[in-house]
Image (cartoon, rainbow, N blue to C red):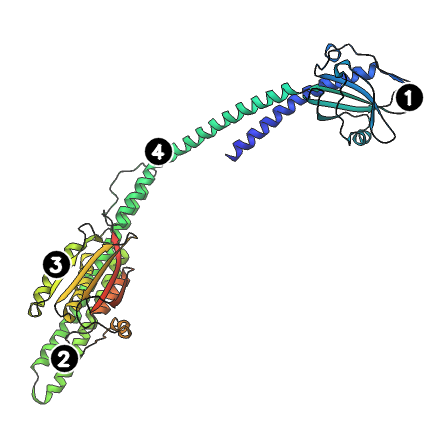
Amino acid sequence: MGALIATGMVLTSQFQESGLRRLGGVLNTTIDSVILATTASPTAVVTPQILDQRTLETFSGKYWSVAEQTPDGSLKVITRSLSIWDGEITVPAELPDRLQDAFGQTITYNATGPKGEPLRVAATIKTLPGREAPIIFLAAIDRSAIDADTRDFARVTWISLGLLGLGLVTAVFLQVQVGLRPLFDLKQEIANVSQGKSARIERAYPTEIAPLAEQLNQLLDHNQEVVERQRTHVGNLAHALKTPLSVMLAEAGDLSGDRAALAEIVRRQSEVMKGQVDHHLRRARAAARAAHGLGERTPVAEVLDEMAVMLERVFQSKGVEIDWRAPDELGFLGERQDLQEILGNLIENACKWSKRRVRISAGANGLGQMIVVVEDDGPGLPEDQREAAMKRGARMDEEAPGSGLGLSIVDDLTRAYGGRLTLAASDMGGLKAMLELPAAER
């Protein structure tokens, strides 16, 4: 657009200059005619009316005059054309000095005529035979027609350039919308994959970008293969470690008598080892899935329903009631097994410490994340102990069953997905755990 504006200004300026040059040619001819008709002597300068009909008609728009410079620097008109009548050609104060500096050359400027019309004026200073003092000759012509033509030309030019600019913008817009439509479609498909709406690039694309879509699908396949391979390795490691630990626990349970104390130590330490192994295996598995598991979408309501039904049965002896609320369309951007691990540990912890009631609410915050809040009516947790509760192996009550890894597992898995776990006091009297996890669009 800047180029079009510059083009319009240059064209308008050149058109005006062309018209003024034409007027300059007419003015030079008039000055030459006046100079040829003028005779000079030491005491007088005589200029008869030249044979130009317009200079003989009053206020015709074409004028000439002959003047001389007075000792005080002003101009004194010696004679003038009949067309000026009782008026005069406007002379700027600096004109005499300019004429002296450019002696013999013609200077042009704009002025106002006897009727207030715009004039184009040409002036020169000459020395004529018979007179030592130089004489100033002026010729002027009405430039209203040139100004009007310039305005018309400028209007047509700006309208034309405006239409051209609009056409160019429209053409560029259509080129972007139509020519680049496949790229926009590919971008949307990639977004769908990252948001869990699809697992692959499905659409067919033009030959220019088809290789890109194919490479993206190969990358997704490779990532899925890496995830599956890591799952297999994790499973093999879990089996290799858990089996010896299970044997140690079984053997320790059979020892009695003098070896009972040793058996108890072995049993406790084996349970701790087993818990640590479970913790690190879950963490490694979740980190791998979070890094490579694009395209996974897990309905939150289904998982909450499963967890609530299962844990109400587990804590049936306490009569625990789990009240949960979650929109049907809410989805977790990650694998179902990880969400089960996170919510299972969190809700189980709430059930363990509650008196009877556990309340769960889930929803999206509109920023690409989902918020899950788990509350209970138990004794709660002092503020100065909340951070310690999320450390690995921390147990707030040594008499309660468990390894102390529940909240630590939740915190580690949540961080693996770029989320956050915070603890606060609940208005139910117990603890409130707030989860922030990536949300999947529908």
Foreground residue among 440 and 276: 440
Q: Nearer the viewer, mark 1 or mark 3?
A: 1
Q: Residues within 10 Å of mark 3 (few under 14, many from 20)?
A: few
Q: Nearer the viewer, residue 393 or 113?
A: 113
Type of amino acid at the residue the image marks with label 1: Arg
The residue under label 2 is which amino acid type? Arg
Of residue 53 and residue 208, the one placed in the foreground of this image is: 53
Q: CA distance from mark 1 to mark 2?
A: 135 Å
Q: Earlier in the sequence, mark 2 or mark 3?
A: 2
Give the residue at x 91% y 21%: 131
Seen in the picture, residue 251 relative to 187 is either above or below; the reply is below
Residue identifier under label 2 = 267
Q: Which mark is residue 131?
A: 1
Q: Residues within 10 Å of mark 4 (few under 14, many from 20)?
A: few
Marks 4 and 1, how far apart at CA: 81 Å
Q: Position of residue 60 (x, y in %)?
A: 70, 14
Secondary structure at badge 2 equals: helix
Residue 42 relative to residue 160: left or right: right
Q: Which residue is mark 4?
A: 178
- Assess disc 2: are there few (<14), some (14-19) or many (≥20) residues with their C-alpha within 10 Å of its C-alpha: many
Q: Count of labels shown?
A: 4
Instruction: Single out the mark in the foreground, 2 or 3.
Output: 3
**Residue at label 3?**
306
Foreground label between 1 and 2: 1
Where on the picture, by quarter, is residue 139? top right
User: Separation of disc 1 and disc 3 at Cα?
Assistant: 120 Å
x and y percent of residue 167 in the render?
44, 28
